Image (cartoon, grey):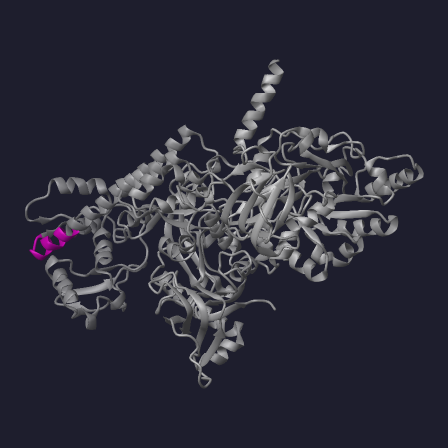
Amino acid sequence: MSRQTGTIVAALVATWAAGFTPPVEGGDRPFAVRAKAYVDRDGSVVNGATLIVKDGKVSAIGSDVRVPAGCFVLDRPDATICPGFVDPHVTLGAMGRTGEAANSIETEADAAELFNRYHHDFDRAVRAGVTTVLLTPRSSHLVGGRTVAVKTAGETTLTRIVGPGPIKLSLAPAAFTTARPPTSLQGGLARLRGMIAAARADRNDEGAFAKWARGEAVAIVDTIEAAELGSLARLVADERVKCVALHGNYAAERLSDIKLTGQPVILGTYEFTDSLRFTRTPVILQREGVGFALTSNAPRYGPELLRIGAAIAMAQGLDAAAAHAALTTTPAEIIGVQDRVGSLEVGKDADFILMDGQSLDLTSRIIEVFVDGRRVYRADTREAGGTSRSPDGAAGRVN
Amino acid sequence: MLRALWRVVAIAAGVGACLVGSPASAQDAPKAKTIMIEGGTVLSMGPAGVIEGGTVSLRKGKIKSVRGAGRAGGMPNPNQVRIDASGKYVTPGLIDAWADLNVAPGGNAGTANASCRAIDGLDMFDRHDFEQALRNGVTAICVEPAATKGIVGTAALVRLADLDNIGASAETDVCLVVRLGVGKVGPFLRLKELAELRKAFKEAKEYREAWEEYEEELEAYAKDLKAGKKVKLDKKKEKAKSADGKKGKKPKGRKGRRLRPRDSSGESLMAWLEELERGNAGAAGPGAVSIGETQFCEDDEDGSDEEHATDVDDFDLRSWLDVYFSSGDGSSGGKKKDASKKADDEAKKPERPKKDRNKELLVRTLKRELAVRFEAHRPADILNVLELAGEFNLDAAVVGASGGRYVAEPLGKAESTVVLGGMIRTALFENGHYRDHDSVNAAVLSQADVAVVIGSGPGGGGNRAHYLRQNAAIAVGAGMDAEGALAAVTINAARVCGVAESLGSLEPGKTADVVVWSGHPLSSGSVVEYVFVGGKEVCRREP
């Protein structure tokens, strides 16, 4: 009884903390959002937007969509609808707890066990427009275990879990300490190759590591220093496994290695102290036809850095469409949840942001955030000292 | 004077480096071409406002004109370099009013380091950070001494005119930097810091009063001398001479050249002073000239009265009097006794207060000759700063102000200037003083009529100056208007650094620090097309 009450209270607190207001009248009824524009799958901005949401999914989107009679309509004439951002590497709500210190190899560990949906880290991510994240084990493990893709807001733990993500490996220096084997990069790679051979020999192993070893799934691999990209490229070439380099800040300087992996790269975190040497990487990768996603590594850094990171790359000449892909479709594909999130298309989850300007301009403000068709955040207009920048005056009305 | 000489040398060296550094400018130098930036949207940040399709012309390092005319057309003029900026934006060079790039960390924590200078801690040879800033449209950066507590020294404004010789174009001693409650400082220690600050300014005030009193007394003394009163100095000197033949002549602790009349009668001294005031002494000079019966000479180490010429233009009467009247000053105790016994027919020699370099700087702030910037973050600390600034009538600005939005009203009423640091604090665990940080500060403060300046701010373990405009953009995203945010990195930044006469806006006569952007400078997709510093192109978009 008391436990149940506690849960309910916690849920109420959580929803309040997220700035939750009951979405549009009755969350399960279909509703429409009419806005100035929306950002399409390819990152282009389409003027005139009507989005119809039904059962938490996108039921229709376009500039010439008719709103059915009786459908509740949110009019946001100044807003741009943008798909919710996807962050492929976070430890939200589990900072410092995403690793088993005693072992370097934890093939069966599952980041889903760490998912603490009540944690305030998720609220901050929502406010930054991030709606789907991949909880990942830390870089201190050669094999960190399985990742999990979760929504940053939602009703229950189960509905918030989108699905298991790739297995997480690390070739970063942090993975090799003298405290436990393997203690070196080459020792780690030797272990990894042995494990791959063993997994291939056992056809019945359906574990995440075995699937990766057989080339059926990708792994996300920490490669912080330039040299590790070379090791990764060799592993991929020898074993024909699929690897996505994480923190591939040297990707532009190790282009041949990155191209050898045949996978996109996860870049970042970009912040204001970063040298132009690194923040130019996206521009070079785009020119070379290598895909890339950005990460904020929240909460080590603020989740706001996802959008700011895109702006930082754009200041070096990256075009808006490529920057948009790095925050939405590319990370969704890396995680393997592209059927559900990353773009606003019929049948996909209704995870979207309403902004009062261009989605990647830092001058734009995130006004409202929706996850699975429910409004989970609305900007507090009082915060800005009473500016009327929010389209709050335009209340919803029934057609 | 020595410093002035060094400055001349430094400037000369700077010019040399320019010529060596870029042969093109050496070629152009004799002709002094006019650069015409034509057809762009000019965000002048000055009286000219926003001009669509405007022309900004630069000549001899200055802005020649800012006008609405489009391309003039006609024959190409060989004396003009024309830049087509149609579809682009033209702004003054951005000024980062608060940065700590390339300044050596550490320094003494305390309240008496006013004479520390940021310019001395600046690594001028680390071109990388300066280049990054330039490539993102930042043309001037204000750096502070790195110490974190109390009166930490003076800030410098580094203009990125010539990366080979940053020092030549730096404005030193832009303002005094004071920090209150920076770091993880508990309430009692913060109050102690405040008390120490108040004490320092109070002592500076007393110091100033003591010197003013001294100067008054000195005038009175000179008057007495003029009136023919007997100078006590004579007595003392004779005493000293008779007492000690070897050392009596040389006062302790003072070195260098000293001028004094050979006959020390007040009459001849004042006669010479009057001559000097009338400008007649210019021909004669005090070095080796006799006026009336007075012979001027120098006291040299060996005590021989050799004659030396001294530059009359450099002659400072007050310091001369200063030196002269202190020359016989052996013991202050005895002098006090003299003063108490002073007879009506005696001229009283005033006691010269001790010089203190730190206090001298604080006195300049009390006279409002030197601005003060207080870094304070917690609302209570900010209010204390306002009170302190009011108490001592300081030309003060608040820097940091993480919790500024809670005290926006008093800040506005005091017509304050607030310099905000980086809009996004990215670290997981913040220092105590950044706990209240929120990017909404800029909007709230500007709505309360506070002059808002946005800097890149310290922290994060690296240079942040090159992302200045992104910080301004974030402020807009949090509710500030775009014009205010742009002013916060241009004209307002120039004002708080005391250089608004020459920088911060596009106005005829100002220094030609100009940036051409591919789009609005606060828009993410815009990139820098050209940067001009002092009318010279220093950066161009990479193709």
Question: Image height check: is A385 above or below A94?
Answer: below
Helix, strand or loop for the magenta stretch, by majority: helix
Give the camera-side residue of B459 and B327. Answer: B459
Estimate the x, y position of residue A370 in percent, counting from the top left.
58, 39
In this picture, residue A293 sits left or right of residue B267: right
Q: How many marks?
A: 0
Q: In what quadrant of the picture does the C terminus of chain B appear? A: bottom right
Give the camera-side residue of B314 and A355. Answer: A355
Estimate the x, y position of residue B351 in percent, counting from the top left.
20, 46
Q: Is residue B219 magenta?
A: yes
Q: Is residue B506 magenta?
A: no
Give the camera-side residue of B394 and A88. Answer: A88
Question: Image height check: is A156 above or below A32?
Answer: above
Q: Residue furthest top?
A: A1
Residue A239 visible within the image: yes
Residue B374 visible within the image: no
| Quarter occupied by residue A103 | top right
Estimate the x, y position of residue B395 in percent, counting from the top left.
30, 48
Say which residue appears at 43% left-offset and 56% top-offset. B486
Question: Image height check: is B133 above or below B30?
Answer: above
Q: In what quadrant of the picture does the N terminus of chain B appear? A: bottom left
In this picture, residue B183 sits left or right of residue A94: left
Say which residue appears at 34% left-offset and 69% top-offset. B509
Q: Residue furthest front?
A: A69
Give the camera-side residue of A390 and A69. Answer: A69
Estimate the x, y position of residue B301 in percent, counting from the top left.
32, 58
In this picture, residue B324 sits left or right of residue A299: left
In this picture, residue A222 sits left or right of residue B24: right
Q: Residue furthest bottom?
A: B75
Find the magenta span and give its range.
Answer: B218-229
Question: Image height check: is B181 above or below B524?
Answer: above
